[in-house]
Image (spheres, grey):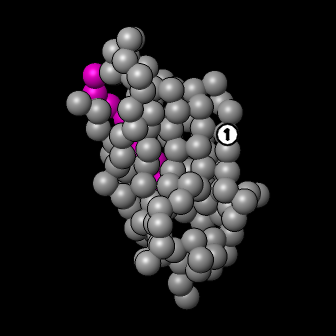
């Protein structure tokens, strides 16, 4: 069973910063990629940023230049540093991991429980 435990959400003023963390644990053959998705009230879940084990990262246009994703392979933990936060960044942020349970099985997506980020004065 793969578990993703998120932390770091909260309330911040516009222009402020937050850092989200997500630690992956459990039995897995490999963890190929991790990322952060977000869902604002009344909207669909959307990609914020992803990163592969080799370090290739991808960002939504709306967060480029403000958010930075990184992965500590030794801790199997992914981070999302969010700077210059805007009210429109308010959402529940979900951690995602693409994991192979065994060597011969296609990767599956696993999700964390979500952490609330609210940007408001």
Comparing 92 with 17, the one in front is: 92
- Classify residue 7 as left or right of residue 57: left
The answer to whether residue 106 is above or below residue 56 is above
- Classify residue 9 as left or right of residue 61: left
Q: Does the magenta-highlighted stretch encompass residue 113?
A: no
Q: Residues within 10 Å of mark 1 (few under 14, many from 20)?
A: some
Residue 69 screen position, x and y as percent: 61, 46
Question: Which quarter shows the C terminus?
Answer: bottom right
The answer to whether one can see residue 34 in this image is: yes
- Classify residue 84 as left or right of residue 50: right
Comparing 58 with 87, the one in front is: 58
Question: Which quarter shows the N terminus?
Answer: top left
Q: Which residues are magenta?
A: 19-27
Give residue 58's quadrant in the image.
Answer: top right
Secondary structure, mark 1, is: strand
Q: Which residue is mark 1?
A: 57
Residue 119 screen position, x and y as percent: 53, 77
Residue 68 screen position, x and y as percent: 66, 50
Residue at the (72%, 60%) spot, across then down: 61
């Amino acid at each position: 069973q793969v578990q993703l435990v998120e932390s770091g959400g909260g309330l911040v003023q516009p222009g402020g910063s937050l850092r989200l963390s997500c630690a992956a644990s459990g039995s897995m053959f490999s963890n190929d990629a991790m990322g952060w998705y977000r869902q604002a009230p009344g909207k669909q879940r959307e990609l914020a940023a992803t990163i592969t084990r080799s370090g290739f990262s991808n960002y939504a246009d709306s967060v480029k230049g403000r958010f930075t994703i990184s992965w500590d392979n030794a801790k199997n933990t992914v981070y999302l540093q969010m700077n210059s936060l805007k009210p429109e960044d308010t959402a529940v942020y979900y951690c995602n991991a693409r994991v192979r349970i065994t060597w011969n099985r296609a990767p599956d997506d696993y999700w964390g429980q979500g952490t609330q980020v609210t940007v408001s004065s």
